[in-house]
Image (tube, helix red, strand yellow):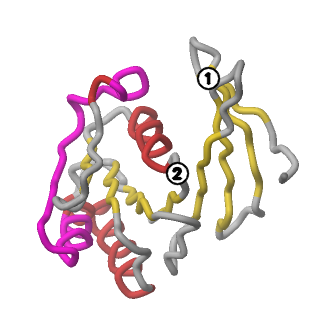
Amino acid sequence: THEVCGPARRFLAVLMAGADGGRFLWIRPRWLPDRLYPDGMVRWCEPGRMVEVAPVRTEDLLWCTEEALRSGTVGLVVVELPQPPALTPVRRLNLAAEEGASRGSVVPMAVLLTAGNGGAAGVESRWHMGFAHGPDRTAWRVTRMRDRTLPPARWLMTDTGIDLHLSGPVAPE
């Protein structure tokens, strides 16, 4: 279970889904007005591989995530959360992913999308993605805020028009 926060968190999750290459599940609250625009993500990830789930109740967001991980049928489960979950729900997600890996053909991974600077307890890593656009560039700042085995670091991701170029680690601002 990994956490992605910041204003460009959805874009980083779309990039992760594109890199994964398989089917993926995107779980979002039904009341959330923001939705993914398939034409906007097609350059980075094939939208036809995505299954969107939109539960009505907040508690069903993590339940759906847990069940998807436990099934072992999808490699990536992205869930948009209104606030970071506590340690127990994250631990349940990790256990469900382990169970799914043992029964399915893929090793599932959960990506929790949280606002601000995140703060979910018990995640393997926490990433922040923000905008670094300029008059002559389209770019993002990618920061590894927390990881169980690696120190914090920051990179600059630039869109070259052909692909994305990652430079760094760069010094914090």
Numbered disc total: 2
Of circles 1 and 2, the one toward us is 2
| Residue 23 position (above or below residue 116) | above
Q: Which residue is mark 1?
A: 159
Name the residue at the left extreme.
Answer: 56
Amino acid carrying mark 1 in the image: Asp
Residue type highlighted by circle 2: Pro
Q: Residue at x 51, y 80 (%)?
A: 121
Q: Is residue 95 one of those drawn in magenta?
A: no
- Neighbor class of circle 1 (other Cα within 10 Å; few <14, some 14-19, many 20+) is some
Q: Nearer the viewer, residue 163 or 74?
A: 163
Q: Quadrant of the N terminus?
A: bottom left
Instruction: Give yes or no for contact between labels 1 and 2 (Cβ–Cβ under 8 Å).
Output: no
Q: Is residue 28 left or right of residue 143?
A: left
Residue at the (45%, 85%) spot, across then down? 87
Judged from the image, the secondary structure of the residue bearing numbered disc 1 is strand
Q: Quadrant of residue 88?
A: bottom left
Q: Position of residue 152 (x, y in %)?
A: 75, 61
**Gap in Å between the C-alphas at discs 1 and 2?**
17 Å
Where residue 37 is drawn, which disc sits there?
none
**Relative depth, front residue between 132 and 51:** 132
Q: Residue at x 58, y 13 (%)?
A: 161
Start-end of magenta stretch = 40-67
Check disc 2 and report the residue beneath it: 7
**Residue 75 at x, y percent in the picture:** 33, 48
State which tag comes first along the sequence, 1 or 2: 2
Image quadrant assignment for residue 136:
top right
Side (left or right) of 104 relative to 56: right
| SS category of the residue bearing label 2 | loop
